[in-house]
Amino acid sequence: MKKIIAFAAIVLVLTGCIGKTGTKFKEKGGEKIEESIQIIREADTNKELALIILYDNYEGIPGLKTDWGFSCLVKTRRENILFDTGGNSEILLSNMEKLGVKSEEIDSIVLSHIHADHTGGLFGVLQKNSNATVFLPTSFPEEFKERIKSYGASVVEISREEKISENVLSTGELGFSIKEQSLVIKTSKGLIVITGCAHPGIVKIIEKAMELTGKKVFLVLGGFHLLNKSEAEIKEIIKEFRELGVERVAPSHCSGDLTRRLFQQEYGEKFIENGAGKVINI
Ligand SMILES: [Zn+2]
Ligand SMILES: [Zn+2]
């Protein structure tokens, strides 16, 4: 029995967050890719920032590879911040290439938590760009930190809330068994909260972001980690989103199909169908 439990625990650590839905592989969709590239270019000239989903198990546009994991590039006027790196560097780099995102242009990499579906693509990026600064939770294993440094990249350990750059901050390590940081971006429309897997609880993360900044939340994007929740439980969480005044939502990765459907019902056109290749301009 102990062996079975130990095996299950290893599988859990290796695969990261429980459950796999929405996984598809497609190679077509050139037109949609062009559209996304166009939106990214627009962000360079007349937008405040762009959020580019580089890795997800849900499809954002056809033509990009989908795979279990999450990665989002935050492109501001000042810099490019890569939040999480998906599970596989080949898939990450291939999606980046298709969208015209260059590894060399990444200034900082923020890792939400240690699970392989969020950290697996890191070293492939560092191989091409060792100038990036990697912001990770202090609780990461020492050997992981040393491995990053061996590429020549610098490591910034995050325990409490901390500024990543102008208008971008980390919530700090939250949660108990699986510690995780989320990204909070201050924009003219309100806060954007980006979560990897939201293991500490999606509502807790939103509350933390509001408490740190005293501002309202415009958009919550990423993995909400509600795969194993019942319809009643998810509806309760959606109610809390409304009470907190969250304006828009873009759940993907470990949110689950049911969560996406229920949020879509509630939020209507303020629900963003999120997935690999999706670009959101602010
Ligand atoms: Zn995950
Ligand atoms: Zn996880």
Image (cartoon, grey):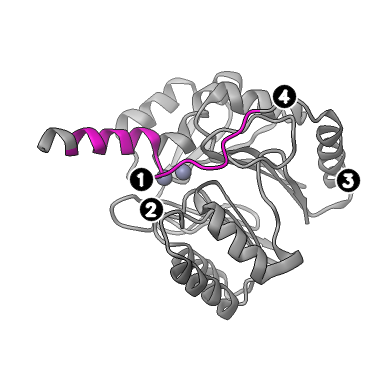
- Residue marked by disc 4: 27
Helix, strand or loop for disc 2: loop
Image quarter (top left, top right, bottom left or bottom right) of the N terminus: top left
Image quarter (top left, top right, bottom left or bottom right) of the C terminus: bottom right
Q: Quadrant of residue 5?
A: top left
Q: Are there few (<14), some (14-19), or many (20+) residues within 10 Å of tag 3?
A: few
The part of the chain drawn in magenta is: 5-25
Which circle's residue, 1 or 4, is located before the other in the chain?
4
Residue furthest to the left? 1
Magenta span contains residue 7: yes
Q: Are marks 2 and 3 in contact (CB under 8 Å)?
A: no
Helix, strand or loop for disc 3: helix
Which circle's residue, 3 or 1, is located before the other in the chain?
3
Q: Are marks 3 and 1 in contact (CB under 8 Å)?
A: no
Q: Are marks 4 and 2 in contact (CB under 8 Å)?
A: no
Using residue 143 as the reference point, say whether residue 128 is left or right of it. right
User: Looking at the picture, which amino acid does disc 4 mark?
Assistant: Glu
Which circle's residue, 2 or 3, is located before the other in the chain?
3
Which circle's residue, 3 or 4, is located before the other in the chain?
4
- Residue marked by disc 1: 138
- Residue marked by disc 2: 159
**Assess mark 3: CB under 8 A from ligand 1?**
no
- Rendered location of residue 152, percent (x, y): 49, 23
Whole-number angstrom distance, CA of label 3 to CA of label 1: 36 Å
- Residue marked by disc 3: 45
Q: Which numbered marker is on residue 58?
A: none
Q: Are there few (<14), some (14-19), or many (20+) residues within 10 Å of tag 4?
A: few
Q: Are there few (<14), some (14-19), or many (20+) residues within 10 Å of tag 1?
A: some
Which circle's residue, 4 or 2, is located before the other in the chain?
4
